[in-house]
Amino acid sequence: MSAPKPARPPQRVVLEGHYVRLEPLSMAHAPDLFEASNVADGDARFAYLGDYAPKTQADTEAFIQSVLGKADPILFAVIDKSTDKAGGRQALMRIVPEHGVIEIGSIYWGPAIARTPRATEALYLFARHIFEDLGYRRFEWKCNDRNEPSKSAAERFGFSYEGLFRQHMIMKGENRDTAWFSMLDSEWPAKKAGFERWLEPGNFDADGRQKTPLRFG
């Protein structure tokens, strides 16, 4: 094996898929993101995020303003290509190019994105970009250990559970034990093939139900 090489820092680029497009987050996304976030179960959806469910569009604008121009994290809007509206957001964060390590985080997938092929493709577009375009060796997913849906999503997306970091953070005034997951560059070819098989439009019936589950290998 050749010696590991540093990866490249991510840039604010557009990542195009079949179901979604990832765009660098900007103030132009505020109206759509507020609409996607201002939902009946918004407080529950934001329970494990670092920010709170917005009550006004000004709250969404303030969040966007707080991250604009930062090199870490870099936020992207998830655009639902069927409506051309931003239905969620996600970030590349804890970026360490010299070691080839990067994390997906600050994930909010609204009702039109969550639990659909759009969410799976949004994750896939990040993974393909960081492994193939930027040369990262390790892709991380971390979440509050109490966040069972996030842990289930990490495993469904092909991340491997690596353990629990106890009393890792204080989040919103409460202790957070953090579950760590990862995917490696050596694993990516098999993961990529599984994602691409599942994301094929022919894998879904007229009602959008999958014909075969997401699997790798």
Image (cartoon, rainbow, N blue to C red):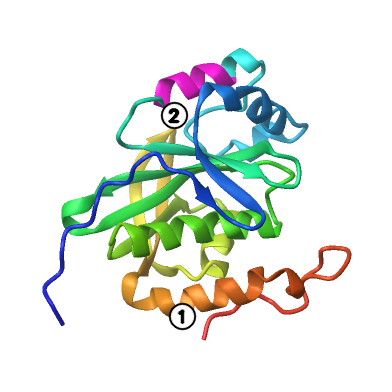
User: Residue 86, image x and y in percent?
Assistant: 64, 36
Crowd tier of the residue under label 2, counting other residues whose Cα lies within 10 Å: few below 14, some 14–19, many 20 or above: few
Q: Find the residue positioned furthest to the right.
A: 206
Crowd tier of the residue under label 1, counting other residues whose Cα lies within 10 Å: few below 14, some 14–19, many 20 or above: few
Q: Residue at x 52, y 57 (%)?
A: 123
In the figure, is residue 170 to the left or right of 202?
left
Which quarter of the picture shows residue 98? bottom left
At label 1, which amino acid type do we have?
Ala
Identify whether 79 is placed above or below 187: above
Identify whether 99 is placed above or below 77: below
In the figure, is residue 187 to the left or right of 110?
left
Front residue of 207/152: it is 207
In the figure, is residue 99 to the left or right of 15?
left
User: Residue 51, image x and y in percent?
Assistant: 51, 29
| Residue named by callout 2 | 173
Residue 68 belongs to magenta span? no
The magenta segment:
60-67
Name the front one of labels 2 and 1.
Answer: 1
Identify whether 76 is placed above or below 33: below
Disc 2 is placed on an element classified as: loop
Q: Residue at x 50, y 71 (%)?
A: 158
Task: Please state, as top left, top right, bottom left or bottom right, where the N terminus lies in the image.
Answer: bottom left
Mark 2 vs 1, N-terminal side: 2
Distance between mark 2 and mark 1 Cα atoms? 40 Å
| Residue named by callout 1 | 190
User: Residue 75, image x and y in percent?
Assistant: 45, 37
Q: Main secondary structure of the magenta part?
A: helix
